Every structure is written in C-alpha cells, then in structure tokens.
C-alpha cells in the first residue's frame, strides 16, 4: 500500500481510439490519447488503482496509479524525498511574499 501524500505519477485516458479525430494517422488512431501527470497521492493506493492526486498547481486529478516517486529518465537522477520536503518548506514559508 502506497501512503497518502507520496509523490506519484498517474496515467489518464483523454480519448479512446474510437473517439480520435478522423484526420489522425491510422497508427495514431489505434491507440488511446493519454497523459501522465505527477502529484501527491490523496488516499492510500496500489499500482494500477484508480486514485486522486493533487498537482503542484493544486489541481485534483484522477487516474490509474502508474509509478511511485517517479524520476526523470534523462539523467537528472532519482527522486530525492529530502529535496521535496525542502521545496515544500520553502514554498510554505514564502506564500505571503507573492
């Protein structure tokens, strides 16, 4: 079970293959139009579960839980929990400056 407020990635289907525009190339039309989104888990869940997350901008989104503590694959390294806590602390302490 993945704990609430863990940084995760979800995947959400926007359009099913049959809902895609007619001018879309055939190879593209065969697959759903999906997007991946990162945020903090609002309730505990497991990989593959339908979950709600809150994004960096405060938006709440629902999707299938894909990855825990996602990292970039272009050599920025793995997710560092301490850096997320520092970021959140700085953000909370500077809210009134904006």
Image (cartoon, grey):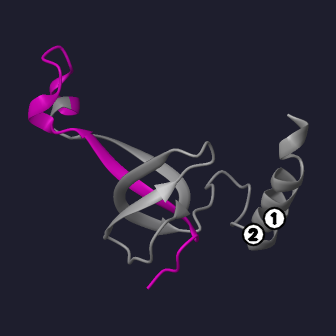
Q: Is residue 55 magenta?
A: no
Which element type, helix, strand or loop, lies under badge 2?
A: loop
The magenta region covers 1-28
Quadrant for the C terminus, please. top right
- Residue at 17% from the left image edge and 27% from the top image edge: 20
Q: Is residue 9 magenta?
A: yes
C-alpha distance separating marks 1 and 2: 5 Å
The residue closer to the viewer here, 58 or 23, is 58
Name, please, the residue furthest toward the front.
Answer: 96
Residue 6 occupies quadrant? bottom right
Q: Which residue is mark 2?
A: 80
The residue closer to the viewer here, 74 or 92, is 92
The reply to whether the C-beta atoms of the residues labelled 1 and 2 are less than 8 Å apart is yes
Tell me where residue 75 appears, x and y as whole percent: 71, 55
Residue 17 is left or right of residue 49, and the answer is left
Q: Which residue is mark 1?
A: 83
Name, please, the residue furthest toward the top.
Answer: 23
Residue 95 in the image: above or below residue 24: below
Tell me where residue 66 appears, x and y as whole percent: 41, 64
Residue 51 in the image: above or below residue 46: above
- Residue at 69% from the left image edge and 66% from the top image edge: 79
Q: Residues within 10 Å of mark 2 (few under 14, many from 20)?
A: few
Which element type, helix, strand or loop, lies under badge 1?
A: helix
Residue 70 occupies quadrant? bottom right
- Residue at 43% from the left image edge and 85% from the top image edge: 1
Residue 80 occupies quadrant? bottom right
Tell me where residue 7 appears, x and y as whole percent: 59, 65
């Amino acid at each position: 079970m993945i704990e609430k407020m863990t940084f995760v990635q979800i995947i959400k289907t926007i359009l099913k293959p049959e809902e895609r525009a007619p001018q879309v190339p055939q190879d593209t039309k065969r697959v759903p139009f999906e997007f991946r989104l990162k945020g903090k888990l609002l309730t505990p869940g497991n990989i593959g579960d339908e979950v709600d997350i809150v994004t960096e901008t405060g938006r709440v989104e629902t999707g299938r839980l894909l990855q825990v503590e996602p990292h970039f694959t272009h050599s920025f390294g793995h997710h560092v929990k301490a850096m997320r806590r520092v970021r959140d602390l700085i953000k909370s302490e500077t809210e009134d400056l904006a």
